[in-house]
Amino acid sequence: MNSLFKRLLNVKGMVVEDVRVADSPLRPEPVLEVRVRPHAGMLRCSRCGRRCPGYDRGGGVRRWRHQDFGCWRVELVAMMPRVDCPGCGVVVAAMPWAEPGSRFTRDFEAECAWLMTVANQKTVSGFLRVAWRTAGRIAHRVAGRLKETMPSPFD
C-alpha cells in the first residue's frame, strides 16, 4: 500500500504510514487522510536546507491540502519533527512535499498557479474548493519561487 499511495501522491522523500477516510459531523464532506512521515535520512533545516540530525518529534500534527483524488479531498497528515541545525539552531524540519509555512503541498500549489493562468481567480477557487484570496496568495507564492529560479523574466 505504501508504494501505491506514494505513486498516486507523486511525492518523493516520504513514507505512507496509514490511509483512512475521516468522516465526522464537523466536516462538510469526507476527507481522505494520508498519514505520512519523511524518510529518516531526509531531515533538513527548513531555513537553510542543510541536512541535520533530528532533535525531537516536534510539538504536534500538521495537515497539508493535496490534489484531490476525483471527488475526494486529500490531506497529508504528519508529525513535525525538529532538527538541530548548526547554523540556525533548533527549528522545524523541512517537509519534502511542502514549502515552509504553507498549508498546501507543492503539487497543489503548482496546480492552482497553472489554473490561474487559464481561468479567473473565482473559477479556480471554486474548482479547488479554497477561498478566492487563498488561490491568489498561492499564485503569488509560486510566481515568487519561479522568479527566484529564473535568470530572466523572459525564460
Image (cartoon, grey):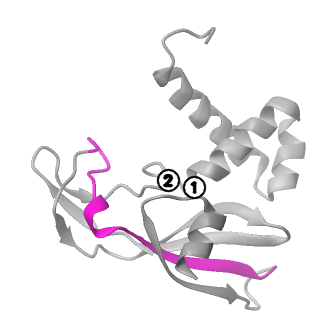
Under mark 2, the amino acid is Ala
| Range covered by the magenta-colored residues | 29-49
State the residue lying farthest toward the bottom. Answer: 24
Earlier residue among tags 2 and 1: 2
Residue at image location 69% in from the left, 47% down from the top: 134
Q: In the image, is residue 106 part of the stretch drawn in magenta?
A: no
Q: Which part of the image, by quadrant, shows the N terminus?
A: bottom right
Residue at image location 80% in from the left, 55% down from the top: 128
Residue 139 spot, x, y in % from top left? 67, 36
Asked if the residues shown at circle 2 and circle 1 are in contact, with their CB atoms under 8 angstroms apart, the answer is yes
Category of crowding for the residue at label 1, using alpha-carbon neighbours closer than 10 angstroms: few (below 14), some (14–19), many (at least 20): many
- Which quadrant of the view contains residue 57? bottom left
Which of the labelled discs sits on residue 105, or is there none?
1
Along the line of sight, the residue nearer the viewer: 139 or 15: 15
State the residue lying farthest toward the left. Answer: 86
- Considering only vertical position in the picture, is 50 above or below 72? above
Question: Which residue carries the number 2 mark?
Answer: 98
- Which quadrant of the view contains residue 143? top right
Residue 116 spot, x, y in % from top left? 79, 35
Residue 125 spot, x, y in % from top left? 81, 49
Q: In the figure, is residue 89 to the left or right of 48?
A: left
Under mark 1, the amino acid is Thr
User: What whole-number distance in Å separates the C-alpha atoms at marks 2 and 1?
Assistant: 5 Å
Residue at image location 41% in from the left, 58% down from the top: 95
Q: SS at mark 2?
A: loop
Q: In the figure, is residue 77 to the left or right of 126?
A: left
Residue 30 spot, x, y in % from top left? 77, 82
